[in-house]
Image: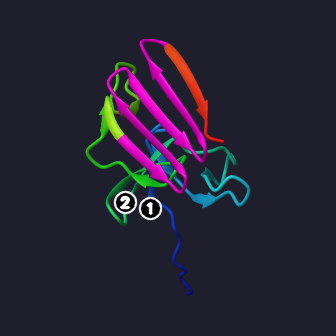
């Protein structure tokens, strides 16, 4: 008998509520479910014991909360950094910097500023 190792049961998709196999999408850089080919919002890497935000690959341990419908989301205060992309959420205030573009959302009002 020959046994091969596999990634099965390494990644737990918090949105789907089940173990999935993941791979990196070469075009977007996001982690995608190999079965559905759709991006994964948030997942647990059971080998590393980390919760990962799928869009950036950032470790978000300690910033995950269970919301009313039983799904998971990031809490009210967190920071994400991925290359030139930065996002800071503090309650209702959101600041995003992506390259030379800055976005600020406060009290439902969105302001966009581009550096020249």
Asked if the magenta segment contains residue 2, the reply would be no
Q: Please state if 78 lies on the left or on the right of 2 as rendered.
A: left
Disc 1 + disc 2, Cβ < 8 Å: yes
Q: Which residue is mark 1?
A: 10
Residue nearest the viewer, comparing 21 with 76 = 76
Residue 111 versus residue 99 in the image, above or below: above
Res. 40 image quadrant: top right
Q: Residue 18, image x and y in percent?
A: 47, 45
**On the rendered image, what quadrant is the N terminus found in?**
bottom right
Work out whether mark 1 precedes mark 2 in sequence or the reverse, and give the earlier one: 1
Q: Which residue is mark 2?
A: 46
SS for dot 2 = loop
Which mark, by number, is residue 90? none
Residue nearest the viewer, comparing 100 with 15 = 100
Asked if the magenta segment contains residue 93, the reply would be yes
Residue 103 versus residue 10 in the image, above or below: above
Main SS of residues in magenta: strand
SS for dot 1 = loop
Q: Residue 44, image x and y in percent?
A: 40, 52
Residue nearest the viewer, comparing 64 with 90 = 90
Q: Residue at x 53, y 71 (%)?
A: 6
- Name, please, the residue furthest toward the front: 116
Q: Residue at x 45, y 40 (%)?
A: 87
Q: Residue 74, image x and y in percent?
A: 37, 35
Q: Which span is picked out in magenta?
A: 79-108
Quick one: label 1, few (<14), some, or many (20+) residues within 10 Å?
A: some
Q: Residue 99, image x and y in percent?
A: 60, 48
Q: Residue at x 52, y 51 (%)?
A: 56
Q: Residue at x 52, y 41 (%)?
A: 97
Distance between mark 1 and mark 2 Cα atoms: 5 Å
Q: Please state if 27 lies on the left or on the right of 52 as rendered.
A: right
């Amino acid at each position: 008998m020959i046994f091969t190792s596999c990634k099965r049961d390494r990644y737990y998709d918090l949105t789907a509520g089940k173990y999935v196999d993941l791979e990196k999408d070469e075009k977007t850089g996001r982690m995608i479910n190999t079965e559905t080919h759709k991006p994964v919002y948030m997942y647990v890497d059971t080998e590393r014991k980390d919760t990962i935000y799928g869009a950036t690959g950032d470790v978000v341990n300690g910033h995950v909360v269970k919301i009313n419908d039983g799904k998971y989301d990031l809490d009210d205060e967190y920071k994400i950094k991925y290359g030139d992309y930065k996002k800071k959420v503090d309650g209702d205030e959101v600041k995003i910097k992506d390259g030379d573009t800055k976005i600020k959302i406060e009290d439902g009002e969105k302001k966009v500023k581009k550096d020249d």
